């Protein structure tokens, strides 16, 4: 039988009270009008948590949070919130580096520890341990689980990687959508795109190496391996749009490529997505031309300047005279890209 206890009543009097409760695990509390007792398992069904009186003067059980979290008021309720550093600046990102998983590089992506500010600039997102996600499986919370938000894995596609949070837990998800992922758990409302990757014609994740904002292609033997984007393509006078293979779509990036035309012409590359002259002859002294890099039949263009794709992974190419398809046509090899990862774009 539960031992007698001294309790102070609402009117300030002290009485001896012996709850009509048996057992060795109970909680005695004042319910607003009387002292009552209840089995611990009734009040804390999970066996872990904190018993509080909330703003409505009702008893509330707050389940334990993750290690390091603190009890905070969130809206009109009290809950454990994961500990975070001081508010990060808008657009901030550190770490959260993407890589092919060593054991399953064709299907799994690892995301390293790191932190960033979310897209809405309302909270910080933190990964305190490496998280691995599988592109073949739909998203389930936790590492070594599915990572795809909706649908099934697609070939020759771009997947955008997001860190997401419900205010307590942090996770990673993949999506074809470059604006916002579709998360099956509606409580995960905070997100930030931290990078992107592409799949090949077999649906495998291409091998890449991320260094900061740079994403570089390489083979499984760690030998740099460009992707052939154009091979002997014909180019006409007046500005022609070409789409770069292996570059992420739906976002603006700086492509890393090598381009060449061996025909005896002058030629240039330029950004598209904005207005440019319908007929453009890129001569050396053409001060009115809008080209960003000029080439001749003896030169090779590499993108060392700030040339960006549009969201359809396109750039423009123009020539002083038409170039036929074949050995003297346009060749472009893609080595990777530079992704702002939400800091500006």
Image (spheres, rainbow, N blue to C red):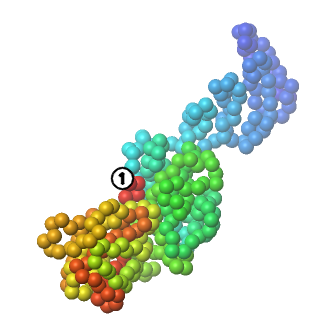
- Where is residue 141 shown, x and y percent of the image? 62, 56
Residue at point 44%, 44% (across, down)? 121
Q: Quadrant of residue 71?
A: top right
- Where is residue 115 shown, x and y percent of the image? 44, 51
Q: How many marks?
A: 1
Residue at point 47%, 68% (across, down)? 197
Residue 312's place in the image compared with 141, above or below, is below
Q: Quadrant of residue 293?
A: bottom left
- Residue neighbourhood size for the residue with mark 1, other residues' Cα within 10 Å, grouped as few (<14), some (14–19), many (≥20): few
- Where is residue 322 shown, x and y percent of the image? 28, 83
Residue 27's place in the image compared with 48, above or below, is above
From the image, which quarter does the N terminus lie in?
A: top right
Residue 27's place in the image compared with 49, above or below, is above
Q: Residue furthest bottom?
A: 327
Local secondary structure at mark 1: loop
Q: Which residue is mark 1?
A: 344
42 left or right, relative to 203? right
Residue 159's place in the image compared with 115, above or below, is below
Q: Residue furthest left?
A: 285
Q: Of 190 and 276, which appears nearest the observer?
A: 276
Residue at point 44%, 54% (across, down)? 114
Q: Of 14 and 130, which appears nearest the observer?
A: 130
């Amino acid at each position: 039988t539960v031992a007698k206890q001294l309790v102070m009543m609402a009117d300030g009097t002290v009485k001896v009270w012996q709850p009509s409760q048996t057992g060795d695990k109970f909680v005695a509390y004042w319910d607003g009008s009387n002292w009552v007792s209840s089995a611990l398992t009734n009040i804390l069904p999970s066996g872990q948590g904190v018993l509080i009186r909330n703003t409505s003067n009702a008893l509330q059980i707050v389940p334990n949070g993750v290690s390091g979290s603190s009890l905070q008021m969130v809206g009109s309720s009290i809950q454990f919130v994961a500990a975070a550093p001081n508010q990060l600046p808008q657009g901030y990102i550190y770490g959260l580096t993407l890589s092919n998983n060593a054991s399953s590089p064709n299907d799994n992506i690892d995301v390293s520890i790191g932190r960033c500010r979310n897209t809405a600039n309302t909270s910080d997102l933190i990964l305190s341990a490496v998280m691995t996600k599988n592109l073949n499986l739909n998203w389930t919370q936790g590492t070594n689980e599915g990572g795809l938000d909706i649908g099934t894995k697609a070939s020759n596609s771009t997947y955008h990687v997001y860190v997401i949070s419900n205010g307590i837990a942090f996770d990673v998800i993949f999506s074809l959508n470059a604006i916002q992922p579709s998360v099956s758990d509606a409580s995960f409302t905070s997100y930030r795109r931290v990078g992107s990757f592409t799949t090949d014609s077999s649906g495998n994740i291409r091998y890449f190496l991320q260094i900061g904002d740079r994403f570089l292609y390489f083979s499984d033997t760690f030998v740099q391996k460009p992707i052939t984007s154009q091979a002997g393509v014909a180019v006409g006078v007046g500005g022609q749009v070409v789409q770069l293979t292996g570059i992420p779509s739906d976002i603006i990036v700086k492509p890393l490529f090598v381009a060449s035309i061996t025909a005896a012409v002058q030629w240039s590359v330029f950004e598209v997505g904005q207005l440019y002259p319908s007929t453009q002859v890129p001569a050396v002294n053409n001060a009115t031309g809008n080209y960003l890099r000029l080439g001749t039949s003896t030169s090779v263009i590499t993108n060392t300047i700030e040339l960006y794709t549009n969201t359809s992974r396109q750039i423009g190419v123009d020539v002083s005279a038409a170039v036929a398809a074949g050995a003297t046509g346009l060749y472009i090899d893609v080595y990777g890209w530079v992704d702002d990862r939400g800091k500006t774009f």
